[in-house]
Amino acid sequence: MLRVFVVGYDKMLSALISGSVYAGHKVVGAMRIDRVNYSKFALFLKDIFAPSKDYSLIKAFGARDVKASSINSKEFIKEFEKLKPDVILVGSWSEKISQKIAKLPRLGTINCHPSLLPRHRGANPYFWTIFSGEDLTGVTFHYVDEKFDCGDILMQEAVTIDLNMTSGELRDRCSKYAQGMVGELLNKLERGEITPQKQDESRATYEYQIEYKDIIVDLRKSKLNIHNHIRALKPWYTPIFKDNARKIEIKKHRLLALDDKHSAAKIGSVVFENSKIIIVRALDCLVEITK
């Protein structure tokens, strides 16, 4: 049985903790992203009046909720020395982990990245794989090294992307895969049955954090491109269509066939509007936006 420490948040934190426990390993501690995002006092109040699912999960599994302001802090090192985990698992984390911290556990620090590395390194691979129109992604467990998402691969599985799947739904699917994979990973690590594999740098792509410009839907693109863009943004961002200086949020929409009546309209122009809907001409379709 390995002693496991998990850092992360939301669905991936849950997957790594539950998957480790179900495989018979001991999650001795966990650190949630709230420790980085909130002051100690603000988090104290939040945990009393509006506790997160992450906090409830850690308590439910009997893990120590580590009170450190950063994974790279002296506080974290002190907690690590008390708990003596064999491995640190990382699932969705905003800080760059120093090599000093990464090398603390005897079996290393392992990140769970939701893509088929070396494809889609970096931020929000859920968005970028769907935005790119790909029908296959994956879950990769790899060692944390000095560069983001570049460490040797320990385990990897492909995950299919359905045509109408949103980023949130893809996150849920990848998390379920991670939950099943992490137990096998820990078992094989314990038995010394994993041979790390170098990543193929010739195939590497790196994505940046989503910016404001990335939520603006370009109606000069094809119907499929528009469909991929909108579903890639859900549920975290509301897509926007720009009509000159006017910004229209696409909260609910339908993509309609481009008929003869509107085929001569300028791309990006509003061809119909009333109190309930707006219809916009795109490259090869009409976009109906519900107000």
Image: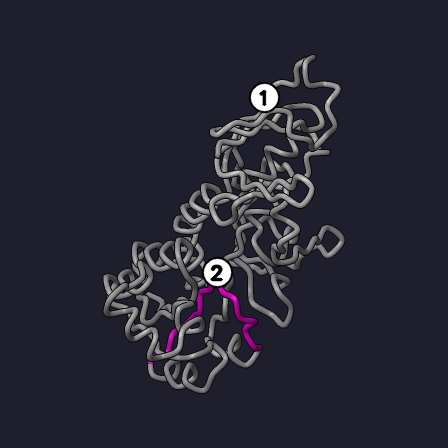
Region rendered in magenta: 83-98
Residue 142, disc: none
- Note whether 281 is above or below 198 in the view shown: above
User: Residue 94, percent across and down?
Assistant: 52, 66
Spatial distance from mark 2 to mark 1, Cα to Cα? Answer: 37 Å
Residue mark closest to the camera, 2 vs 1: 1
Q: Identify which amino acid the numbered label 1 is placed on.
A: Leu
Asked whether the residues under the numbered discs 2 and 1 touch, taking CB atoms below 8 Å apart as contact, a structural biologist would say: no
Label 1 SS? strand
Of label 2 and label 1, which has the lower sequence position? 2
Q: Residue furthest front?
A: 275
Regarding mark 2 in the picture, which secondary structure is present there? Answer: loop
Q: Is residue 255 above or below residue 85?
A: above
Examine the image and state in which quarter residue 269 appears.
top right
By secondary structure, the bulk of the magenta-drawn segment is best described as: loop
Quadrant in the picture for residue 148? bottom right
x%, y% of residue 23?
32, 55
Residue at screen point 47% across, 29% down = 276
Query: Looking at the rendering, in which quadrant would you find the N terminus?
Result: bottom left
Residue under pointer 1? 256
Instruction: State left or right for residue 145 relative to residue 6.
Output: right
Residue located beneath label 2 in the image: 92
The front one of 14 and 26 is 14
